[in-house]
Amino acid sequence: MVYQLMDGEVSLEELVLELRGGNVKEAAFHIGFFIVLVYMASTVPQGVEGFKPIRPPHPEWLHFRPPYQNEYNKVGGRITVRSDAAKQTQDAYGEARSHKIRKDYSSKLPTLYVEGQNKRITPWETAKKVYHGPAFGLNPSKYGLTQGDLNSIAKNGIINHIRDGGTVPPADYVKALQKRWKAFAEHKNVRDCRIQTVMGEQCHIVKHDRTRIFLSFKADSGESFTGYQLKKQQSLDHNKDGIIGNDYKKL
């Protein structure tokens, strides 16, 4: 009944009726246990008011073209077609820009290591996932970022977002998210899910079941990959199948 109360399937009023009905010991136990769970959950990052959770798929997570990429190139209802020469120029620009931005973050921020584990949280991988900050309790508005900025980075990738004049995620925000990821990975209430699949990538996953937040690290390198709050059904599916997201490499 406690978990039903946490999920909203049973109201607190129903427990109070249990007390009035004479089942004092059972109701008192449920209420006491509920309070303990609320306290435990309060030590794990929660969402930030005013910011919506952003979930996959997102193109910059992966090194291949997502199946819906043409949707981002529509102009006036028509899909733009670039010549090979223009594409090569754009690719060269993107590579150079990507290298510069990566270098800027890496020169300002250290790589954090999860205590006692072969896991590392790099500035660049964290910067690419700044739109998941609210899931880990960070308020982007305190760092000059808006919901529109997060949506843009999630949709177009951080390189294209900056190239198009978008706000550059401040190093302080990236650093704060790195620390949140480290604290989450080391939290005593997260579950070690071991090696599982995230978006087609083999990852070492840690997950907090009550909040449905997870964090993943690439199995081969130990580098941070991604993390966010799953929907209830996604979390149930993950518990059953050990898979998060679709394998877009096969689409």
Image: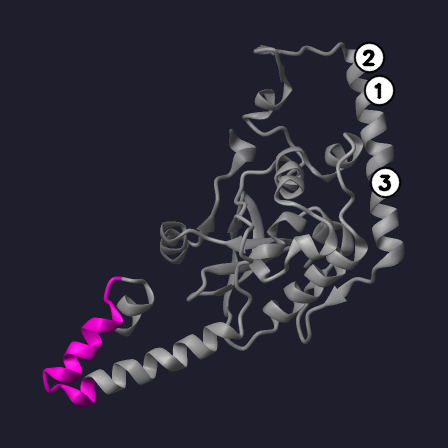
Quick check: marks 3 and 2 in contact, CB under 8 Å? Answer: no
What kind of secondary structure does the magenta stretch mostly adopt? Answer: helix
* Classed neighbour count for the residue bearing mark 2: other residues with Cα under 10 Å, few (<14), some (14–19), many (≥20): few
Q: Amino acid at mark 1?
A: Thr
Residue 84, percent across and down? 77, 12
Instruction: Report which residue position mark 3 lands on.
Output: 99
Residue at figure coordinates x 76%, y 41% from the top left: 167
* Classed neighbour count for the residue bearing mark 3: other residues with Cα under 10 Å, few (<14), some (14–19), many (≥20): few
Taking 7 as reference, is 147 left or right? right
Instruction: Report which residue position mark 1 lands on.
Output: 89
Q: Secondary structure at mark 2?
A: helix
In the image, residue 5 sits, relative to residue 30, either above or below, namely: above
Taking 167 as reference, is 62 left or right? left
Quick check: marks 2 and 1 in contact, CB under 8 Å? Answer: yes
In the rendered structure, which disc, 3 or 2, sits on the residue that comes first in sequence? Answer: 2
Most extreme residue toward the left is 21
217 or 161: nearer the viewer: 161
Q: Which residues are magenta?
A: 9-26
The CA span between labels 2 and 1 is 6 Å
In the image, residue 18 sits, relative to residue 204, either above or below, namely: below
Q: Is residue 24 magenta?
A: yes
Instruction: Report which residue position mark 2 lands on.
Output: 85
Residue 136, percent across and down? 59, 61
The CA span between labels 3 and 2 is 21 Å
The CA span between labels 3 and 1 is 15 Å
In the image, residue 202 sits, relative to residue 20, either above or below, namely: above
